[in-house]
Image (tube, helix red, strand yellow):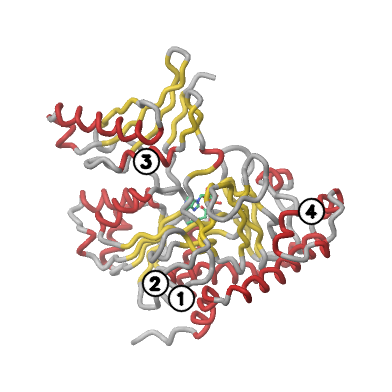
Amino acid sequence: MSKLKIPASVGDVCAKDYLEPGYLRDLQLYRLKNTIQHCYDNVQIFRQRMDNLKLKPGDIKKLDDISKLPFTTKFDLRDNYPFGLCAVPMNQIVRLHASSGTTGKPIVVAYTQHDLDVWTESMARSLNACGVTQDDIVQVSYGYGLFTGGLGAHYGSEFIGATVVPTSVGNTQRQLMVMQDFGVTVICCTPSYFTYLMEKAAESGINLKDTPLRVGIFGAEPWSAEMRKHIENGAGISAHDIYGLSEISGPGVSINCGHGEGLHIFEDNFYPEIIDPDTGEPLPDGQIGELVFTTINKYGMPMIRYRTRDLSSLITERCPCGRTIRRMQRISSRTDDMLIIRGVNVFPSQIESALLAVEGTQPHYNIILFTEHGLDQIEVAVEVTQELFNDQVREMEKLQHAIASSIEHVIGLRVRVKLVAPQTIQRSEGKARRVIDRRER
Ligand code: DLL
């Protein structure tokens, strides 16, 4: 029996990626004004901050006026835990998610049915931009639960009319069995988990290139262009970068369509700005700074000028795919990921790029920070193949040297490189933790 026809709404929803720019700006302004009025009327701390600045919702007359508004940060969500930033009564909230964070209480986010619909549409538009259709079988290997990855990808795939396989994270052998037996064509998971799946597939004698798998939708953590190449060449799929964060909705804030650089932002829902992370001043298009989002089509817990701490820049040139919505550069790092080593600013993503640019390296590594003679040092532990590890001392030394030089060339610091046996670096099922800080404080 064939599937029922694709719902007409998929076409309508995806057409929003091609809005005429003048119309899009008008729509954004209209929605921005609505959101500000809604927050002013319903969120106490927002009203207080506007009053302190002697601002009234009516003072926001054009899109650029957004820079007059106060920022919202993770601390605001923490301080008002759990529901203090809700802008509707609790009986209008139909779903809660939370992002774990590293310390203390999680950050809670709340959605009305309208908010869930907008999120689902944004995810459907993301999948559509990667060429996913109702003919696809989508394995969702992001975690289901308080994390937004699983349910976000799930609802978006169903909206498209694809067949969803909700495997969630873990049980890697079963994931591979399902992938093969069900003829999975699209997988959604973190890029680090996919490299683990690739490794397990190879160990089990499965050549992913011989399976119907053709698209991977990877996000929730930073990953380099080199990692993308490693995945695309190793698995024979096209790998797309998907970005999002719980505070703004979840996955599907932006997506790489595969035609051009960067990720298309669904900016009729999520209004982007780039600011100088130190001064808070807006930066011009093309310049790298902190990404800030205002949700302009969200009612449960809208975010005004939310500081993501993610570093990116805006691309305004039209993408070859024809979408009119603007793009952002792939996230290079977070402001709070930056390591300061002997006065030099180092981002873990730079180390990943330099490492994977060296032939023969595996994407399983840790960055270990330690103190020696009172100075901060970096050690990069990288796995090598069993063959190399067993007996080719010369080859090992050559590789070690090549990796150290490649990294030094990029970050300007000499690092210690340790080649370790296969399977000694911990694998991740969700967001990878690459940096281990053992510095003396
Ligand atoms: O990670 C939502 C998500 C799920 C996105 C699945 C993509 C796929 P949080 O747990 O709230 O939400 O974490 C958000 O993860 O501020 C970034 O620092 C990072 N992040 C998310 N996507 C990317 C990406 C989900 N494509 C935080 N590249 C964000 C780099 C990413 N970092």
Mark closer to the observer (1, 3): 3
Mark closer to the observer (1, 4): 4
Residue 108 in view here? yes
Q: Amino acid at mark 4?
A: Phe
Task: Find residue 46 and name its label.
Answer: 4
Identified at 36% across, 26% down, the residue is 414
- Asked whether the beta carbons under mark 2 and mark 3 sit within 8 Å of each other, the answer is no
- Asked whether the beta carbons under mark 2 and mark 1 sit within 8 Å of each other, the answer is yes
Determine crowd level at label 1: few under 14, some 14-19, many 20+ residues with C-alpha closer than 10 A: many
Residue where numbered disc 3 is placed: 352
Q: Amino acid at mark 2?
A: Val
Pick whichever of labels 1 and 3 is earlier in the sequence.
1
Name the side, left or right, on which 177 lies relative to 74: left
For the residues labelled 1 and 3, the Cα–Cα distance comes to: 34 Å
Residue where numbered disc 1 is placed: 160
* Percent of width and height locating residue 397: 20, 27
Residue where numbered disc 2 is placed: 132
Q: Amino acid at mark 1?
A: Ile
Query: Which quarter of the rendered picture does the N terminus lie within?
Result: bottom left
- Residue 369, compared with residue 38, is above or below; it is above
* Percent of width and height locating residue 273: 62, 55
Q: Under tag 1, what secondary structure?
A: helix
Name the side, left or right, on which 383 lies relative to 373: left
Q: Nearer the viewer, residue 261 or 86?
A: 261
Pick whichever of labels 4 and 2 is earlier in the sequence.
4
Report whether the residue tagged 1 is closer than 8 Å to ligand 1.
no
